[in-house]
Image (cartoon, rainbow, N blue to C red):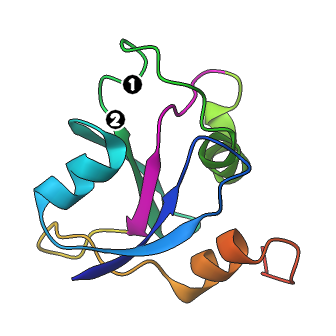
Amino acid sequence: MVRALRIPVDPDEPITEVQVESLEDYQGIVGGYIEPVDIPALGVTVYVNEEGLLRQLSLNSRATFLWWYFVPEARQKAMLVGPALVVGLPNRNGESTDIPGEATELLLNPGCGASR
């Protein structure tokens, strides 16, 4: 089991902690095939729907702005759409890891002093 956070599209819906184990868990959360977006500075991978732009899914502003903040070269060039799943960066075997505590704190308690 991997500890992760689900970021809904609707900014009024809370970000929630979830446990994922299988590919089906990841696909169920993003609503289809998964596409990873790494944010090395935060130690996380954000999974979104691979066909999200083609399917015209709604902008996920929280996931997009998180990506843009930590990966400035992505700003205004790309966006993340649909529900997002945030896990830790892959281990040496290519398997997802638990979301780091600092990332969890930043996303669940914004403005509470997470360092950057």
Disc 1 crowd, CA 10 A, few/some/many (<14, 14-19, 20+): many
* Above or below 20: residue 75: above
Name the residue beneath numbered marker 1.
52
Q: Which residue is at the far bottom?
A: 101
Q: Nearer the viewer, residue 11 or 94?
A: 11
Instruction: Report how far apart the C-alphas of labels 2 and 1 lie in the structure.
Output: 5 Å
Query: Where is residue 100 drawn, in percent x and y?
Result: 50, 82
Q: Nearer the viewer, residue 96 or 71?
A: 96
The three-letter amino acid code for the residue at tag 2 is Asn
What residue appears at the point 46 percent right and 44 percent down from the top-left corner?
83
* Above or below 71: residue 111: below
Left or right placement of residue 44 versus residue 114 in this view: left
Q: Which mark is residue 24?
A: none
Q: Nearer the viewer, residue 60 or 97?
A: 60
Q: Which residue is at the far front?
A: 13
Disc 2 is placed on an element classified as strand
Query: Which quarter of the picture shows residue 113?
Result: bottom right
Task: Report the span colored magenta.
Answer: 77-88
Q: In what quadrant of the picture does the C terminus appear? A: bottom right
Query: Which quarter of the picture shows residue 86?
Result: bottom left
